[in-house]
Amino acid sequence: MSLVQQLVTTLGNATGLLTVLICVIAAVLNYFDDPDPVKYTSMAEDIKTLEENFQRQNKSCFILGASGETGNMLLQELLRRNIFSKITLIGRRQLTFEDQAYANLVQEVVDFEKLDDYAAAFQGHDVGYCCLGTTKAKAGTEGFIRVDHDYVLKSAELAKAGGSTQFHLESSRGADKNSNFLYLKVKGQVEAEIEALGFDRYAIYRPGVLLVDRQESRPAEWLARKFFSALSAVSSTSMAISIQAVAKAMVANTLLQPEQKTEILENKAIASLGKSAET
């Protein structure tokens, strides 16, 4: 057998083993999967009616974290749905958009270290969306806590004081204020502290691994996304989801009127809601 043939055979065997491994892992993850989410009836037929009813209310919203992947995708989805009369981006820098669809956006540049000085930026909005966040690897432990807890909580406080009745928070799968893991503990703490503010409606989204090609180079995250992308091709799992699905779910959920003031959407529920709203 030639060297080339040996190489082809070896690669073929390796691919086969990888496929089997992924299938086995998928079966294990399904066993520990999220419980089945609430069954969302398809919104495809009703979405236009819901949008029109919402549009007539002439509401405004703000987005925190629009420069990030999920926040940017959320902005695109909101513009496509056209359900708000005014959209304000609140961030640490001015964002540049070339498409005319972004022409009517309002941008408020703030210093997150002195948010009390920018309380006016949070006033007069009906709905707040928060996709703000960083990583311990990028910002260090103190920086991570400052962004994912302090900035997020202070923004929610200012939004509540400024008249917002709804607050939608992108959190993380496994968030738990009692967790031994810093990331999950911080996420869980800020979830609970925002709930205590008493918004008329508070939605928490806990996606798994976000499937997106980040602009930043994070080898570990890149490897995880590639793995879960392959995994999702052979099995429905609560461990990963595309940012498009998260954005669609957040917008669709804004149109609904759940009975409870606070709701937590785990990964499967996010995926189910996002899919139900597709048109």
Image (cartoon, rainbow, N blue to C red):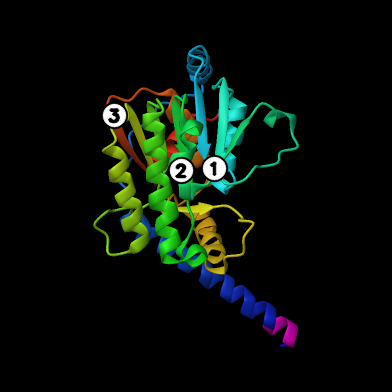
Q: Residue furthest front?
A: 117
Q: Which residues are magenta?
A: 2-6
Q: Amino acid at mark 1?
A: Val
Of residues 113 and 256, the one drawn nearer to the viewer in this rendering: 113
Residue denoted by label 3: 261
Residue denoted by label 2: 115
Q: Which residue is at a point 40% across and 25% down the rendered structure image?
A: 163
Q: Position of residue 59 (x, y in %)?
A: 49, 19
* Residue 210 on the magenta span: no
Q: Position of residue 203 (x, y in %)?
A: 36, 35
Left or right of residue 15: residue 271:
left
1 and 2 marks in contact (CB < 8 Å)? yes
Q: Amino acid at mark 3?
A: Lys
Regarding mark 3 in the picture, which secondary structure is present there? loop
Residue denoted by label 1: 110
Nearest to N terminus: mark 1 or mark 2: 1
Left or right of residue 35: residue 84:
right
Regarding mark 1 in the picture, which secondary structure is present there? loop
